[in-house]
Image (tube, rainbow, N blue to C red):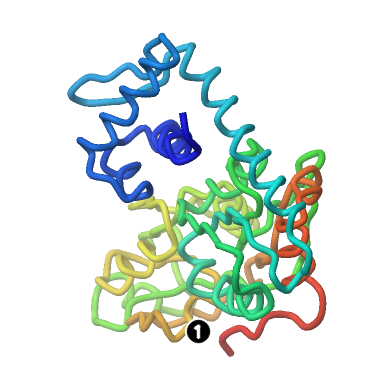
């Protein structure tokens, strides 16, 4: 059983989807299925339960998943220890990020690291707003780049804060009910339709703000990302709440306006998170030190 086969297995165990795992492995779903079948034949046990709708790990699959991740990690450590010069360091760093962080915080730090370590592969995965932190704490990734650092840091985690971005209310530019309701003085917030992410951190900020005004928010839509909030608000679905940093990025041109309110919402701290034990690996430590030392990343103004 070779390392490539183990990587294919890990990709499928992580995604539980032959199409997505095939893309990560550069294989067609049928070729990936044959690879998994060969692994199962060598192990002598079925590792996945397959049906027409889903894929899941068997008990043997869960045990083999732990083995495969450890084997791949130990091989990477061996490669890193054989490197003689830091500038020639190879290997891989796995990074998880939300799409909003990928638009804002991630590009300058990736550029900084690639200039310093051109031979290191950055395996970047984009997830829903809350998922990157879970991936890091469950040892599924080396580092998480977050536009919203958690209020409470898990035991064993190391956090680097780069800065803060305000959370702002946004309304549509086009003429619609949400815009007309927020044009009134004072705004009748109990009538205003809201579009929010399912992020616990964002919800806590918004609910605290409304409690301070003794108003029950009228939430009409909940989505998985701030980009979806921007899209729905620009279409006139309601008023949303997003990090101001996201609106300033060149990659996004939202048809929305910032709605000035008082008091302001409590903002987000953005930065990097990793479990301390992962920094024992030279290539992960090199990534952490390169992107956290020196100046704050150059972000949209």
Q: Residue at x 44, y 63 (%)?
A: 226
Q: Is residue 51 left or right of residue 186?
A: left
Q: Is residue 257 left or right of residue 136?
A: left
Please tell me in which quadrant of the rendered image residue 196 appears: bottom left
* Disc 1: which residue: 248
Quarter of the image containing the C terminus?
bottom right
Nearest the camera: 137 or 221?
137
Please tell me in which quadrant of the rendered image residue 293 appears: bottom right
Q: Position of residue 253 (x, y in %)?
A: 36, 83
Q: Residue at x 34, y 52 (%)?
A: 221
Q: Residue at x 78, y 83 (%)?
A: 295
Q: Is residue 268 left or right of residue 289?
A: left
Q: Is residue 173 left or right of residue 75?
A: left
Residue 118 vertical position relative to residue 133 in the rendered view, above or below? below
Q: Position of residue 151 (x, y in %)?
A: 73, 51
Nearest the camera: 263 or 278?
278
Please tell me in which quadrant of the rendered image residue 15 appears: top left
Residue 275 vertical position relative to residue 236 in the rendered view, above or below? above
Residue 159 vertical position relative to residue 289 in the rendered view, above or below? above
Nearest the camera: 271 or 176?
271
Look at the image and tell me whether residue 55 can be seen.
yes
Q: How many marks?
A: 1
- Dot 1 falls on a residue whose secondary structure is helix
């Amino acid at each position: 059983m070779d390392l490539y086969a183990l990587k294919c297995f890990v990709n499928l165990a992580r995604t539980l989807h032959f199409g997505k795992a095939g893309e990560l492995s550069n294989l067609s779903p049928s070729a990936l299925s044959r690879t998994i079948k060969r692994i199962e034949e060598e192990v002598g046990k079925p590792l996945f339960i397959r049906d027409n709708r889903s894929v899941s790990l068997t008990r043997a699959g869960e045990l083999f998943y732990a083995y495969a991740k450890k084997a791949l990690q130990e091989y990477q450590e061996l490669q890193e220890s054989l490197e003689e010069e830091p500038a020639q360091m190879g290997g891989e760093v796995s990074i998880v990020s939300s799409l909003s962080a990928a638009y804002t915080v991630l590009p300058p730090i990736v550029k900084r690291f690639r200039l310093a370590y051109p031979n290191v592969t950055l395996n970047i995965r984009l997830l829903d707003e809350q998922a990157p932190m879970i991936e890091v704490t469950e040892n599924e990734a080396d580092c998480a780049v977050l536009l919203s650092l958690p209020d409470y840091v898990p035991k064993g985690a190391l956090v680097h804060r780069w800065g803060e971005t305000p959370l702002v209310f946004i309304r549509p530019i086009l003429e619609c009910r949400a815009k007309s309701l927020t044009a009134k003085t004072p705004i009748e917030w109990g009538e205003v339709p809201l579009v929010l992410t399912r992020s616990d951190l964002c919800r806590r900020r918004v609910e605290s703000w409304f409690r301070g005004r003794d108003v029950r928010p009228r939430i009409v839509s909940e989505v998985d990302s701030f980009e979806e909030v921007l899209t729905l608000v620009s279409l006139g679905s309601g008023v949303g709440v997003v990090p101001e940093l996201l609106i300033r990025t060149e990659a996004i041109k939202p048809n929305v306006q910032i709605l000035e309110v008082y008091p302001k919402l409590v903002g987000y701290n953005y930065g990097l998170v990793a479990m301390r034990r992962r920094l024992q690996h030279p290539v992960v430590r090199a990534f952490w030190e390169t992107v956290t030392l020196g100046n704050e990343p150059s972000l949209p103004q």
